[in-house]
Every structure is written in C-alpha cells, then in structure tokens.
Image: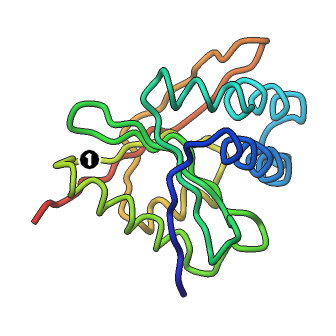
Amino acid sequence: MNLIFPQVSTLEEIAELSRLAAEIWQEYYVSIITLEQIDYMIQKYQSESAITEQIHEQGYEYYFIQREETPVGYMSVRVEEDKMFLSKFYIGKEHRGQGYASLAFAFLEKLCMERGIHLIWLTVNRHNESSIAVYEKKGFRTVREQVADIGNGFVMDDFIMEKAIHIS
C-alpha cells in the first residue's frame, strides 16, 4: 500500500483540506459532541481562513494522507522546541481500518527523527474511545486531563497523550 504525505501550502490545497475536514468532522464527531459544537469548531479551526492563519502565522504544518491522487485524511503538526504537537489527525470513514494510521505515524516519527524531536503529544476528547485506543496501540500514554474553553459556550474536554520518540 503506497501512501504519500504532501504538505499543504497552496490556496487550492487549503480549500480542499477544509472541505475534507468538514466532511470527516461532521461524520465522526456526531456521536461525541453536538452538531452546533462541530459546526463552531470547523469554522474556528478548519475553515480556509483558520487553516491559512495556522500555516502562515502560527507555525502549523498540514499534510494530506494521500493514496495515489486521493486524499484519504490529513494531519497537522506544530514543532514546539523539542516536542511535536499533533494537532489534527483524521482519516475518512471509508478508509479507516486499512493500516493508514500506522503509515502516517511512521511518517510523523521520521519527521521527528529528522528534526531531532524526542516527543509527540496530542489532545483527544476523553469520550473518543476509538481514537484513544488507536493512540494507545501506537505507543501513546495519557499524561493528564484538560478542559479548555473554546468560546461560544463550548469546551474541549480532553486527555493529553504523549509518545517518546527514540532517535537512533
């Protein structure tokens, strides 16, 4: 299985990623949070303008998870000194369970090794049991809990998970 991880940079790629994000979020999160919160979070974090700002002003890197010419998911990271924050990691419903997450994590670990980064960390909704199970299978462990006010009366009720990267 051949996956590539092209970095998102052009306005066209950002627009495509924003559409993909909305599609995945609306399908996936409906069993975890309200539609109102999903719509609010898509606008706040995954709209074209939000992604553009994150890339150009906040140091985020977005990557498509792509099989041949088709994006099957995406991820976003930001390097913070000697750590990598995995901000977004999503695979479309019809592509889950096919080993794509393992290949994407291998790509992220290679990025860390190339940059001398020793730790990947992420936040995950405490009720997102399937994603937590995937992260645990990939070697992440829960280190603390966090409730963050994201505005408009909504909060993100998350676990913070970390994985050490062993640089050879």
On screen, residue 8 versus residue 11, left or right, reads left
Residue 77, by quadrant, is: top left
Task: Say how the picture is coloured.
Answer: rainbow
Residue located at (67% from left, 41% from top): 14
The local secondary structure at tag 1 comes to strand
On screen, residue 26 versus residue 142, left or right, reads right
| Residue positioned most to the right | 35
Say if 85 sits above or below 100 in the image. Answer: above
Residue located at (78% from left, 73% from top): 94
Give the camera-side residue of 115 and 163: 115
| Residue positioned most to the top | 152
On screen, residue 79 versus residue 55, left or right, reads left
The C terminus is located in which quarter?
Answer: bottom left
Residue 156 picture location, percent across and down: 64, 28
Give the camera-side residue of 83 and 50: 50
Give the camera-side residue of 50 and 144: 50
**Which residue in the protein does label 1 denote?**
119
| Residue positioned most to the bottom | 1
Residue 4 picture location, percent across and down: 51, 70
Say if 8 sits above or below 152 in the image. Answer: below
Say if 52 sits above or below 29 in the image. Answer: above
The N terminus is located in which quarter?
Answer: bottom right
Residue type, mark 1 in image: Leu
How many other residues sit within 10 Å of disc 1, few (<14), some (14-19) or many (≥20)? some
Residue located at (62% from left, 41% from top): 125
Residue 2 picture location, percent across and down: 53, 83
